[in-house]
Image (cartoon, coloured by chain):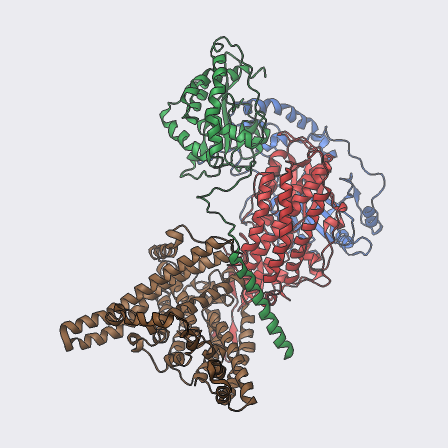
Chain colours: A green, B brown, C red, D blue
Amino acid sequence: MANLISRAFGGLNEVRRGLATVFKHTFREPITKNYPDEMPDLAPHFRGRLALTVNPETGDHLCISCKQCERVCPDKCIEITSHKSPETNKLELIDFKIDHGLCMFCGLCTEVCPTLCIINTNDFEMADYSRESLIYDLKKLTLSQDESAFYFDRKEMPLPKPKPAKPAPAAAGAAPAAVAAKPAAVPSVAAPGADAKPETEAPEAKAPADSKTVEVKKPEVKAEVKEESKPEAKPEAKAETKTDEPKADEPKADEPKA
Amino acid sequence: MFSNGDEIFKISRLTIVWLAGIFTIVWMVCWALGIALPMLLTQQLGDKAALTNEILRAATPVIAILVFIPINAMFMVLIERRALALWTVRKGPNRVGPDGNFQTAADAVKLLLKEDITPTGADAVMHTFAPILFFAPSVFGAVPLLAAVTNNHPLFRVLNLPTGIFFVLAAGALPVVALVMAGWASNNKYSLVGGLRSAAQAISYEIPLVLSLITVCLMAGTLDLVKITEQQAGGILNWNLLGGGALTGLNNALAGGGAKALATSYFMGPISYVCAGLLVISLIISFWLYLTGACAEINRIPFDLPEAESELVSGYNTEYSGMKFAIFFLAEFTNLFIVSSITTVMFLGGGDNPIPPYILNNIPGIPQMVAAIRDSYFCSTLHIINPETFFATLWVIAKVYGLVIFAVLIRGTLPRFRIDQLMAFGWKRLIPLSLIVFIIVVFAREFVICHG
Amino acid sequence: MATEIQEIDLKTDEMIINMGPQHPATHGVLRLLLTLDGETVKHVEPVLGHLHRAQEWQGQNRTWFQYQALIDRVDYLSGMFTSWAMARSCEQIDGTVVPPRAEYLRVMVSEMNRITSHLLWLGTYLIDLGAMFGFPFYPFREREKLFDLFEEIAGQRMMFNYIRIGGVLRDPKPEWFDKLKRFLDEFPDRIDEYETIVTQNPIFLKRTKGVGILTQAVAKDYGVTGPCIRSSGIPLDLRRTKPYSVYPELKFDVITFDKEGDTWDRYMARILEMRQSIEIIRQCIDKLPSGDIMGKKQMAGMRIKAGEGFAAVESPRGILGCYVISGGGEKALRFRWRNPSFCNLSVLHELLKGCPLSDIMAIFGSIDVILPDVDR
Amino acid sequence: MTDEKPSEAEKPEDKKAEAAKPEAAKPEVAKADGAKPADAAKPADAAKPAAPAAAAAPKPAAKAPEPVIPATAGKFEQFLKEHGIPAQRLPLSLEVETIVLSGDVLQAALRLLRNSSEVKLDLLLTISGVDSNDTYDSVYHLWSYSNLDELVIKVLIKKSDVAEGDLPAVPSIANFWSAANWHERETYDLMGIRYANHPYLRRILNPWDWEGYPLRRDYKQLVDCLNDKNPHSMR
């Protein structure tokens, strides 16, 4: 009997201690966040949406169509279309498609990429209404120059070496001009973008890029793809894109040698 | 300590807003139907309105309850979710409306608009009838409580019964039938097991529950809820929780009666002192017994076996959806509220102020405030506010929702019993204990003057 | 249930209940065919395979490099261990030498992963027992903190792909260790909190003490491993009995109980293991050498020498083995997983026989089965 | 490398396939419409699965180092031989003793190894089915709860011995060792090795009406999830 009573009191006391411990949590700050209002603080190496970078200094597209990522992808969700340019005898990128509905964000493609072109961004909000819209093409994938700068900085990736200005006869005149124009133009555009909105930059910058795609007419020739893609990705820097155009051709010309 | 001050502030604000809203609405309905309309009719029609007025006055409490239950259930669900969120270091519902105030209202709308599915092979009539039968007792079971919780307000006095607690308990025992019906009619084995479990559980736990309440009735010498409340008036020492009037002597001694006052209460010397102590202990045990039994009766954790989610999916309401499920849901929370109200009325002195009047009346400002309210236009002419009822109701609200929050805290902490352990606990522990308490109270009461 | 009433005795029929695959407490998609007499279990037959993803087939049809990214999915709660088992078996075949820093990092992240796994188990187990609104959130809170650390080094919170054949993927920054230390300092208090709420709770004791006793004979017969068998008194902990990696250099003891364990012992074993893991991680941080973290070049066309090997690690659920046959090419000839959940689950019908319906969840939860680990 | 010797016969074929592959595969990958490689990969080897997996699968037997069969008999081999059970030695795989038993003596051997007080190999880790070049292997990994011993036992069944439409049969040990029960069912399910006298031999991971044995080399997939076009996705 005494045993029973002491056990009963012991049990009740344990329950009381449990209740008190739970009640103590009244005064602890919640650990959850109001997600859509405040973005989570993601690690730099977070494996989110895949994207293609451009050279943050010059704006050249970094993809060299080596197809390493296409080969390594366990889901086979990457599809690269390229062709060999008859003049320069180089591979030229025509289209780059990633099916984000199929991708499992393992990050293997980013590991094998020799030019640090394909990266995992910190963006994870890709919900959409159809499977087809989850297939991202080159335009949707390519980041703008300041976004690329942001990610190169954040992931502590070495900056790609700027292409030695090849005096390819046609572009020779334009190239020096572009180089001259760059230092002035880049800080003015890239710096505020990267500083002001570090977290939400990618999604926000994506929206204008998408809307722009409608206006831009479909590129028929390989070389133009890149020229087109840049204006959309960086709508505010219209003047700058002009100077980019000649440069965009150049890296392709150099690739086989590099 | 208060790193969470923001959330606590939000939750208090939400509670105050909702409570003010609920009780204003309910009281305005009551006032309009029971006071303003009859006054108007009498002015206009004179004696001819007498019959209409009678009918209106009789209908008022029921209508008040019908208005009160859904809004209150919404608030209770919301406060439960917010409180659980607070205790689990989360934020809780905060998207719909300011502070998430309208979350449960939105949920209710969703539930009402959902498709109502009757599973194949189910007994459609019983399936439909079960939620109604589950819900109805909580409506008419609450009626006699109204007078008790409003300090015998003239508007609700009509429906007070001399056998109030008996009626409430009888009504509270009915939903079991509905649960068995729901379980049987669903054509689902989980539901069936859930229904049968609830029957077994309710029958076993009814006994300690009723015995613990009988102890209180024994103390009071009546079954009338209003009388039980009135007897407990006069501060926390008079509450049934603390032995009813067993400590009255102490009370009086505090008030200045001194040794003489003690002597009148404990007239038989040492025996009376011992008995007073026994009474206090027994009634605290009785209070605990009632809480336990009530938790089992209304299927709250740790006794939520009929709807044990991890075992029986959702028990008797597995196959319910839409409106029918909403009614089950509504009735469950209403039952929680009713059980808390009964506890308040039976053990916690109803609308009584825990601070004894001789202390309260000496606090400067309070008597003047009461007098000012009594003299105000609202009170004297429109009869909107009745100071006796007003403060009593405020205390009832505080106590009842305190108990509700405590139930939520229990829900956040304790795991669930197993059915055989539950039965063993009920039959081997609670029932003997409640009988012992009952017998102690029967004898101890003879030696102590309780309730004056 | 009572179908026909004979003259005196009430004859009852058995009821067959199909528990799962969509049931709140079967931890995924296990299906249990229960034969009940009243609420007493007469017979139980687990039906597996609702989550079968042909992981072994995938291992044979993808390159070594690709498959590394997939195996976190075998047991998604302890992805580090699956990675580690595969990495160890491949390294054995290949003769790769793993740099010591990588080995220490592996031990650290694996022990962290063990903690997260046990935390999840703790939360869900209390849900199984019915405390589903308050307590389960506390373990998950700590788990999220660990996941933040994982996210920093591996890139994702659950599908780490961090331990690779030959080493580990990324060297954590110094700040990462500071964060980890901060976590380790506050975590023991949190465990104390859990224990205050749960361990001696009378209802919890009633539900778990003496329930689901796993005898040593049965456990050995079914090849049970992990905390389940350690709580039954068999000190089988690969980290000590067959030490691999740098475990010999670390100080800790195998957690066993003297008697044949019931559900409460299995709970306690996991709580103690969490505390033990904290100590192991602390030692690792102190001893962490500097140097390289990768012993084999990670590349798409990575090859493993021909040969066959079996390597096992002590995962939170028991011995996780990986049997690999390599033909020397880019792909494996045969991948075979020895999953602890699969073997531990097979003992379930022995434990459940004759217990009431409510105990199914108490017992099933206590052996900590992860369905993707069972079905692969 | 249990199947080194048998594979000698097939070597030339294999080599040819190997040699043919790189050239065949390269251009296709480059062409970037990756649906095709399966057709080209198929050529000679009928036993290989149709999936492009075959491309890398063939055994580069020539590359493998010469297997070293240990000169001295292992502990367990000797133990078994002392008890009159013939056991054949195999090359060590990672320092672990590996022996081949014939199906007839398997039950007796395992019973002995498990119960004898000398060895006590009482932890059956796993039973794996392996589809080797010309044998079906049932591989038993034995450990011990009480000591550090390890043993791998293989039961090899020649494919040529298995009649058309029949399954290779191995005696079941599930009757006296419960751990084997589910492993044998799984091996039956995925590899199609029939364990004779198993108490409840039916599919465990696949649905009961599944056709074929998915891990076999000659298994034909209904849908090749790596290469077939899925209307909803890019592939």
Nearer to me, A245 or A177:
A177
Vertical side of D46 occupied by B236: above or below: below
Vertical side of D145 occupied by D57: above or below: above
Nearer to me, C203 or D38:
C203
Inspect this view and state whether residue B74 appears: no
Where residue C4 sits: x, y (%)? Answer: 48, 74
Inspect this view and state whether residue B19 appears: yes
Nearer to me, A248 or B125:
A248
Where residue A110 sits: x, y (%)? Answer: 56, 31
Q: Residue at x 57, y 54 (%)?
A: C139
Q: Residue at x 72, y 63 (%)?
A: C259
Q: Residue at x 78, y 40 (%)?
A: D92
Where residue B144 sits: x, y (%)? Answer: 35, 76
* Residue C359 picture quarter: bottom right
Vertical side of C200 occupied by D133: above or below: above
Where residue B241 sits: x, y (%)? Answer: 48, 77
Nearer to me, C245 or C63:
C245
* Residue B131 picture quarter: bottom left
Residue at far front of view: B364
Q: In the picture, which quadrant includes the N terminus of chain B?
A: bottom right
Residue at far bottom of view: B268
Left or right relative to C368: residue B111? left
Left or right relative to D25: residue A39? left
